[in-house]
Amino acid sequence: MAPISAVKDLMPEVHSFILETFPDDATSFTWDVKVHMLMPRQYPCIPNWHVDAVPRLNGIQRFDLVRLDLPLYLWVSGPPLTQFEDGYLEARVWHKYGQSDKHRGTPAAEFCWRGFIRATHREIEAPKEANHMRRHSQVYLDAENYTC
């Protein structure tokens, strides 16, 4: 995750898109931007029900530290769509949610590219070290062979 200034430096087209469409103050959020190349039956993300941005101490999720008053936003370019308990995310629309909103990934139905943007309010997570960027390594899971 990175501040909006890093998005501007590294991905100017995405930065412009965010400034033109994001429904909140972009400087108040950290940004996670991914592009997935998928094959049929692959998940782009966690297939089990889960929540985002729950603080961890010593590897243990601390639900007593969540900030339900602060938002997260999610945007995907198209299928496969993220499923929330109350339905599927609409493609190309910013979806506001919180740290207690359960959701899960769904598998791709065809060969596709999927853009993903998550905005997390800066006060939700502890500040990172200066110039810290978490690297993401995608592990594709096949829907027919995945077990919990």
Image (cartoon, grey):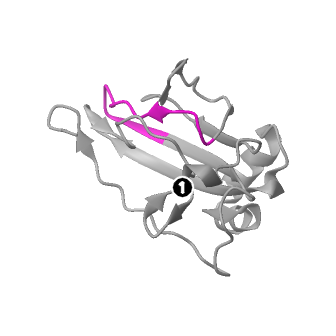
Question: x, y percentage for residue 10?
Answer: 64, 67
In the shown orientation, is residue 92 left or right of residue 116? right
Question: x, y percentage for residue 27?
Answer: 82, 57
Q: Residue at x 71, y 59 (%)?
A: 12
Helix, strand or loop: magenta stretch: loop
Q: Secondary structure at mark 1?
A: loop
Q: Is residue 107 in the magenta section? A: yes
Estimate how packed mark 1 is, as few (under 14), some (14 to 19) or many (20 or more) residues with alpha carbons within 10 Å: few
How many callouts does the rendering have? Answer: 1
Q: Residue at x 50, y 22 (%)?
A: 85
Q: Is residue 15 in the magenta section? A: no
As drawn, 17 above or below 87: below
Task: Write down the residue under mark 1.
Answer: 62
In the shown orientation, is residue 93 left or right of residue 42? right
As drawn, 12 above or below 21: below
**Furthest-front residue in view?**
64
In the shown orientation, is residue 34 left or right of residue 112? right
In the shown orientation, is residue 38 left or right of residue 32? left
| Mark 1 residue type | Arg
Q: Residue at x 66, y 28 (%)?
A: 93
As drawn, 135 above or below 89: below
| Residue range highlighted in magenta | 99-114
Location of the C terminus (image quadrant): top left
Question: x, y percentage for residue 111?
Answer: 31, 33
